[in-house]
Amino acid sequence: MAQDTRMLTLFLMTEKGYRFLVETTAKYGSLFDLVVVGSDGSLRKDHADEIIAFCAGHQLRWVRRADFGKVETPYALAVSWRWLIEHPAQRLIVFHDSLLPRYRGFSPLVNALINGESEVGVSAIFGASDFDTGPIIAQSRTAVRYPLRIADAIQAINANYLACAETVLQALLDGAPLEATPQDERQATYSVWRDEQDYRIDWSKSSTEIRRFIDAVGYPYRGAATMFDGKLVRILAAEEAPDVVVENRDCGKALFVVDGKPVIICGEGMLKVTEAQIEEGGQLLPFFPQTRFRIRFTGGSRETGS
């Protein structure tokens, strides 16, 4: 028999959390007791205001994470959440944007795109003492092709979130048990957290790898970074260009300028930078048009720490 009790506390952040709320409220809103809203200052747009506005417009109780006390419902459910939730593991449901057991941990979608994975997706799992190791309740996947920007990948996996949500929320609405399968530890991989240093481009990599990296850390993230004349430049878009034989392959230097845009030497291949911004006086300003032909980008190597 269907239940209409408000048995869920939702922990939501970013566009993924917002889209989850928008797409599930009409059918499953009777389950939602409280929405806890998280903010992410590392994003250009974290959708916290949109989540709050949607809650206000649909008579859903909400609270910011800083003002939240404790879970008072039987179940808690987290989407795009990065903080510890105190609740029994068998009643804590976490939506993780990878095909677990691969890419446990942080920034799984970003790292999957950087690595050029042919599939991305979402797993709904129970909580566990070790992060992202809980049994899998539902999983949904999407095949992808490159080039692929992170904003488009987020849109693509919205369908995966909804497919997993349908399995989880319908079971709760029906009062049915949530069945889950243990993860195969032999297949487990981990995805390490990223910080500002990890936005730096390593020009010694191939043009294909660098293009994937630029696309994977673009909007809503801050964007791939490099240095030019001691100033930070955000490379927001680029495209691969035909390679040529370079006798002294100095990675990061511009060899050609095509349509006013520099073509940069990479460890393998060439990359035409098509959109970029430079930090000037604490602001990000357009990098183009450039009057200089001799452009050298530096500071991408993780080994140097620069």
Image (spheres, grey):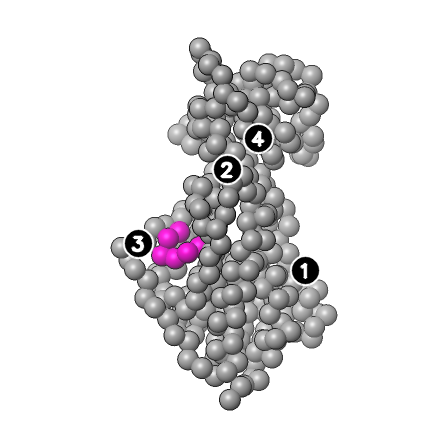
Q: Which residues are magenta?
A: 98-103
Mark 3 vs mark 1: give the one in front: 3
Find out whether the residues at labels 3 and 1 contact each other: C-beta distance under 8 Å.
no
Q: Name the amino acid type tagged 4.
A: Glu
Q: Main secondary structure of the magenta part?
A: loop
**Quick one: SS at disc 3?**
helix
Mark 2 vs mark 1: give the one in front: 2
Could you give the CA–CA distance between mark 1 and mark 4, rounded to whole angstroms? 33 Å
Q: Residue 74 magenta-drawn? A: no
Find out whether the residues at labels 2 and 1 contact each other: C-beta distance under 8 Å.
no
Q: Which corner quadrant of the image does residue 23 belong to?
A: bottom right
Could you give the CA–CA distance between mark 2 and mark 1, rounded to whole angstroms? 29 Å
Q: Which mark is residue 50?
A: 1
Relative vertical location of residue 179 with respect to residue 245 in this rendering, above or below:
below
Q: Badge 3 is on which residue?
A: 187
Q: Which mark is residue 239?
A: 4
Q: Name the amino acid type tagged 3.
A: Gln
Label 1 vs 4, first from the N-terminus: 1
